[in-house]
Image (cartoon, rainbow, N blue to C red):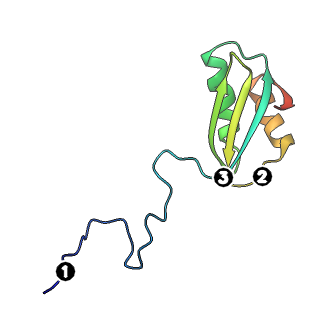
Amino acid sequence: MTSPTNSGSCCTPGGSCGTSPAAGVQVGITTVYKVTGMTCGHCEGSVSQEVSALAGVTSVKAVAATGLVTVTSTGPLDDEAVRAAVDEAGYELAGRA
């Protein structure tokens, strides 16, 4: 008698399941910055676009109401590079939150 195989399984023959992160899960270092001057969705988009262009950045979420910008990256970011990106967008980096 042969046992059925599940060719659609994500499990390896050794019994471990899933070696890659689930879709939508951010992997890396998350840093939260305080940015002053953001007042609307356009502001959020401008800051997000500039910070997203930095090497290693995988996601950016800017929230005008709180002034917080959450950045996920593959490694530590240089705060001065983040400051320059925020300045380029027309806002001021107050520091890490």
Amino acid tagged 1: Ser
Report the front residue among 54 and 30.
30
Foreground residue among 21 and 89: 21
24 to the left or right of 27: left
Which residue is at a point 42% across and 79% down the rendered structure image?
14
The CA distance from mark 3 to mark 2 is: 9 Å
Mark 2 = which residue?
76
- Local secondary structure at mark 1: loop
Q: Quadrant of the N terminus?
A: bottom left
* Image location (x, y in percent) of residue 77: 78, 48
Few, some or many residues within 10 Å of mark 2 (<14, 14–19, 20+): few
Instruction: Give the residue at x 66% y 44%.
Output: 72
Counting from the top left corner in percent of width and height, residue 36 is at 80, 19
Nearer the N terminus, badge 2 or badge 1? Answer: 1
- As displayed, is residue 17 above or below residue 81? below
Give, as a three-letter code, the residue at label 3: Gly
The amino acid at mark 2 is Pro
Q: Residue at x 82, y 42 (%)?
A: 81
The numbered mark at residue 3 is 1
Q: Residue furthest bottom?
A: 1
Q: State the SS at label 2.
A: loop
Quarter of the figure with the C terminus: top right
Q: Earlier in the sequence, mark 3 or mark 1?
A: 1
Q: Is residue 16 left or right of residue 32?
A: left
Pointers 3 and 2 in contact (C-beta within 8 Å):
no
- The furthest residue to the top: 39
- Tell me the quarter of the picture where residue 7 sits: bottom left
Query: Label 3: which residue?
Result: 28
Q: Nearer the viewer, mark 3 or mark 1?
A: 1
Q: Is residue 71 above or below residue 11?
A: above
